[in-house]
Amino acid sequence: MTARRPDRSIATVCLSGSLPDKLEAAAAAGFEGVEIFENDLLTFDGTPAEVRAMCEDLGLAITIFQPFRDFEGMPEGLRVRAMDRAERKFDTMQALGTDLLLVCSSVHPAALPGADRAAADLREMAERAAKRGLRVCYEALAWGRHVSRWRQAWEIVRAADHPALGLCLDSFHTLSLGDDVDDLAATVPPEKLFFLQLADAPRLAMDVLSWSRHHRLFPGQGELPVADFLRGVMAAGYAGPLSLEIFNDEFRAAPSRRIARDGLRSLAWLEEQVGLAELPALPRLAGVEFVEFALDHESREDLARMAASLGFRRAGMHRSKDVELWRSGGANLVLNSEPDSAASERFEARGPCVCAIAFRLDDPERLVARAEALSYPVWRERIGAGERRIPAVRAPDGTLVYLVADLAEGERPIWEDDFHLEQDRADGGFLGIDHAAQAVAPGLMDSFALFYRALFGMEPDAPWELPDPYGLVRSRAFVGGQGAVRLPLNVSESGRTGTGRFVSALAGAGVHHIAFAAADAAEAAAGAVARGAPLLEIPANYYEDLGARIGLEEEELAGHAAHHLLYDRDAAGGEFRHAYTHAFRDRFFFEIAARGGGYAGFGAANAAVRMAAQRKTPRSRGDAGGEQ
Ligand SMILES: O=C(O)c1ccc(O)c(O)c1
Ligand SMILES: [Mg+2]
């Protein structure tokens, strides 16, 4: 570890609720400071002195009071008003007990250009602040009228040349304009770096004001190079707090405690990225060991029949619980009907569903320690004598993620301790679980992103959009262990899309799609069809288009059509062949998938055909319905 960890701060504007709710949530999550956003004070029914007392009781420093708008460059009459307004806000700051004011660059239509004029205004403000022992920092808003970049703000602060005036940097304003801080250390002396605000965002093609006001995210949740930005600022000698400033409509509609906690996790992860703090090291992910279903006996029989049609066989019965293991080669399905368990709790709330997924990784206990350091809940199921306790962490929707040690040759697999095994592993079948896709409720996507990225070190693919016949589905895949674990997350604002219906049918989010890796897709699909598996019918038009688009030979096209296979090819010639089943009781479905030539996607080009086929084919059997 290099220096002492900087204090962690969060702007009240990030959180939902009243000012006291926000402060309590920030303190409960473990922040050391808060930015008091002026609007939160204006709408609070109490004095600034009461806010100060609340913060003191909660152990929170007020790191800054903000924003002070439209100050610099005003023509004479308005300039006097602006100075008066500043004096009034200094009164408020003194009552709050904070010494730092953020002035953001003016957007006022009357604001006049000119660095000298702005410098003179800020110098006078700083002089007035200094008389009261206060300080001012100046921030370039990306949409400022005359000042939109930190270098312009710095020219003004430098020219003003007052010890009570410094710079506020905000990663969003810099990165959203495609700018960087590479020359910050060479340009700005450290004592002039007064404050640092951190925010990430998805890459969106929209005006920067709307982007900033509605779509900011915590570092790690978006696509901006926030870690590089922070490295540059630390290299310039910044010594103040790291403060999160996120304007996001979903954050402000979500429970403040969850959002505050995600904020702290995000900062801890970011500090690890740049070497400011340490966490128990990231895991080495080796694969998905199993997917577990919560079922009653009736649905278990149906699901077992469907699994059998895909080539799975019952491989074992649990020694002490009402749980079956079904296996095909390296793919394991756990069918859990144990009463009074985490699974039954899930079944009672949601009906048949995926209640857990298990990752194979190098050191489960180190991951547990990392989860605890990031305050993700850890779960340990009760066990019978002699059985192995497999630790788990809870995903943001409550799904359990079990942590199973990646075994060296000859080590004893978990299954042997807990199951009476009827069949060993070497029986052909699937190679393993290729990917597990989750439907995520709209407000939870960003929490999931942080969960997979900060806790497991998985990296996000670029987001993409899938056209469901009844609305848009946004998708973003998280990939770990060089493709050993692949988890596409799907979110839909519309309740009518397949994703929307899975979310409502599952009372929240959940794994709704499990892909088994096959060495030979045609062979696996042919076997499945022969055993009566409910594979999706693909329209002939699809194969027509495939021939036209990719130029596959007629014979190959006919083979794909005969086996219900979809086909995709990437720019480097990697190939993907895959077939889908109908959904099991409208809740989840399976896929047979074969990758070749380093193909890293999920057949997104075929998603529209798959979703349409799932919607239009009538329920053909009791265990494999398409329409509700
Ligand atoms: O959107 C704004 O107006 C605004 C205000 C203050 C900030 O620090 C900021 O980054 C943006
Ligand atoms: Mg800011």
Image (tube, rainbow, N blue to C red):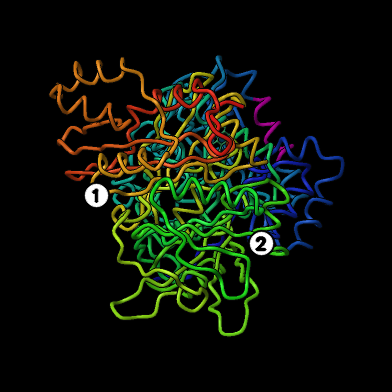
Q: Is residue 99 rendered magenta in the image?
A: no
Q: List the residue tagged with mark 2.
A: 342
Q: Is residue 98 left or right of residue 375?
A: right
Q: Is residue 388 visible?
A: yes
Question: Where does residue 514 sit, x and y in percent of width and height?
Answer: 44, 46
Residue 527 placement: quadrant: top left
Marks 1 and 2: in contact by CB < 8 Å? no
Q: Is mark 2 within 8 Å of ligand 2?
A: no
Residue 600 position (above or below residue 145): below
Give the dominant element type of the magenta stretch: helix, strand or loop: helix
Tell me the magenta residue range: 80-89
Residue type beneath disc 2: Ala
Frontmost residue, 432 versus 46: 432
Quadrant, the C terminus: top right
Frontmost residue, 101 versus 202: 202
Q: Nearer the viewer, mark 2 or mark 1?
A: 1
N-term mark: 2 or 1: 2
Residue 203 placement: quadrant: top left
Question: Where does residue 288 sit, x and y in percent of width and height?
Answer: 41, 58
Q: Is residue 299 left or right of residue 529?
A: right
| Tag 2 secondary structure | helix
Question: Where does residue 140 sit, x and y in percent of width and height?
Answer: 47, 34
Residue drawn 26% across and 20% down? Answer: 543
Q: List the residue tagged with mark 1.
A: 519
Q: Is residue 475 left or right of residue 578?
A: right
